[in-house]
């Protein structure tokens, strides 16, 4: 599924900015659509205590059964090494259980004392599941690369970068606001690496140009008074804010101020090459900081909040 991703807009230039975005990998966490569906089956048991009701126990057993069904599907099993490498298990299981299972049906229910066991069947698109794993793994890989410092560190460049949520966890529809503060006057390069493999250039770009920021001042990006607003939408996963500060502008070959979004891997390669070449014959030094983010869909957020605590199995 390929369509513009309406994350980043200026109030007076919405249509222009949307036309700048052309992400190559947009994975919507929706129903499987026209993809062929396969049957999955899982069993879950839950023993409830005196302060819980049978209805709560049944709901808990249902969650366990659905998640077991997802874990047992061949796509998940075949992707075990990738899932472990990028620590994706909880994210994938919750995402699929919350929004990708279709035609969920209780096949069998048993109750023994205060233990309830359910066996459920559901339909799942293996293509959508594979695409989700690829997207999440790519997002983690890009985030790790973006958080690796590229700029040779120099003394005297104090830089603080933070966001409006201390834990860096954003839910679909949230606004993201980025703050930057430098100890000295310097040129800022600020990028937003998104979970679809696209990087948005917050500074410099065609609207802000080169950013010479002044020491001691706090600058915001995405706030109410700022020209850009950043909204969280699909696809979700690991993301990164990356800031670099130097005495001269950081240039990279192939840079186009009018291009709102770049492919992250290509951009990082060009950026590293540009830093090694220096700026106008001068060696580039400064400071390189990043802020890791995690974005989540509304469906998964609701699912995780309603999900019962650790089950008590006999």
Image: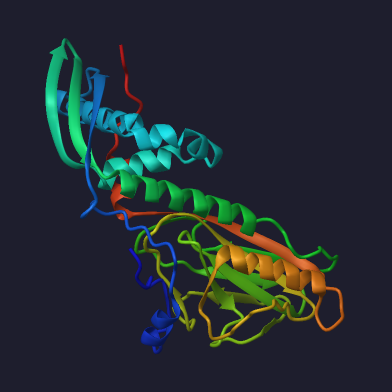
The answer to whether 45 appears left or right of 147 in the picture is: left
Q: Residue at x 19, y 24 (%)?
A: 119
Residue 201's image quarter? Answer: bottom right
The location of residue 271, given as percent across then percent down, is 69, 70
The residue nearer to you, when weighing 179 against 51, is: 179
The residue nearer to you, when weighing 21 against 212, is: 21
Q: Residue at x 47, y 33 (%)?
A: 80
Which quadrant of the rendered structure holds the C terminus?
A: top left
When the figure is inspected, residue 136 is found, relative to residue 240, above or below; the finding is: above
The residue nearer to you, when weighing 259 against 17, is: 259
Residue 16's image quarter? Answer: bottom left
Q: Residue at x 49, y 58 (%)?
A: 165
Which quadrant of the rendered structure holds the N terminus?
A: bottom left
The answer to whether 59 appears left or right of 29 in the picture is: left
Q: Is residue 237 visible?
A: yes
Q: Residue furthest front?
A: 36
Task: Tally the numbered discs.
Answer: 0
The location of residue 30, given as percent across then percent down, is 26, 54
Model colouring? rainbow
The location of residue 159, given as percent across then percent down, is 71, 66
Q: Is residue 157 visible?
A: no
When the figure is inspected, residue 223 is found, relative to residue 124, above or below; the finding is: below
The location of residue 19, given as percent across then percent down, is 40, 82
């Amino acid at each position: 599924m390929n369509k513009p991703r309406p994350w980043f807009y200026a109030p007076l230039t919405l249509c222009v900015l949307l036309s700048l975005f052309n992400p190559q990998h947009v994975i919507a966490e929706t129903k499987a659509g026209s993809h062929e569906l396969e049957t999955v089956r899982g069993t879950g048991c839950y023993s409830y205590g005196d302060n819980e009701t049978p209805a709560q126990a049944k709901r808990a057993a249902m969650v366990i059964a659905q998640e077991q069904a997802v874990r047992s599907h061949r796509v998940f099993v075949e992707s075990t090494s990738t899932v472990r490498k990028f620590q994706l298990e909880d994210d994938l299981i919750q995402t699929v259980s919350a929004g990708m299972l279709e035609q969920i049906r209780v096949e069998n229910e048993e109750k023994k004392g205060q233990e309830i066991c359910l066996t459920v069947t559901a339909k799942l698109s293996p293509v959508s599941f594979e695409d989700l794993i690829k997207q999440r793994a790519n997002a983690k890989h890009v985030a790790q690369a973006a958080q690796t410092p590229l700029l040779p560190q120099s003394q005297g460049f104090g830089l603080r970068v933070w966001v409006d949520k201390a834990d860096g966890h954003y839910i679909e529809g949230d606004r993201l606001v980025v703050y930057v503060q430098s100890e000295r006057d310097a040129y800022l390069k600020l990028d937003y690496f998104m979970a679809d493999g696209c990087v948005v250039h917050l500074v410099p770009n065609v609207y802000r140009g080169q950013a010479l920021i002044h020491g001691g001042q706090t600058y915001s990006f995405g706030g109410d008074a700022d020209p850009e607003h950043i909204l969280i939408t699909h696809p979700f996963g690991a993301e990164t804010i990356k800031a670099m500060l130097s005495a001269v502008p950081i240039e990279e070959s192939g840079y186009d101020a009018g291009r709102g979004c770049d492919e992250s891997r290509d951009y990082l390669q060009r950026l590293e090459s540009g830093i090694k070449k220096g700026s106008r014959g001068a060696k580039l030094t400064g400071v390189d900081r990043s802020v890791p983010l995690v974005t989540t869909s509304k469906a998964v957020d609701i699912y995780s909040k309603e999900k019962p605590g650790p089950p008590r199995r006999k």
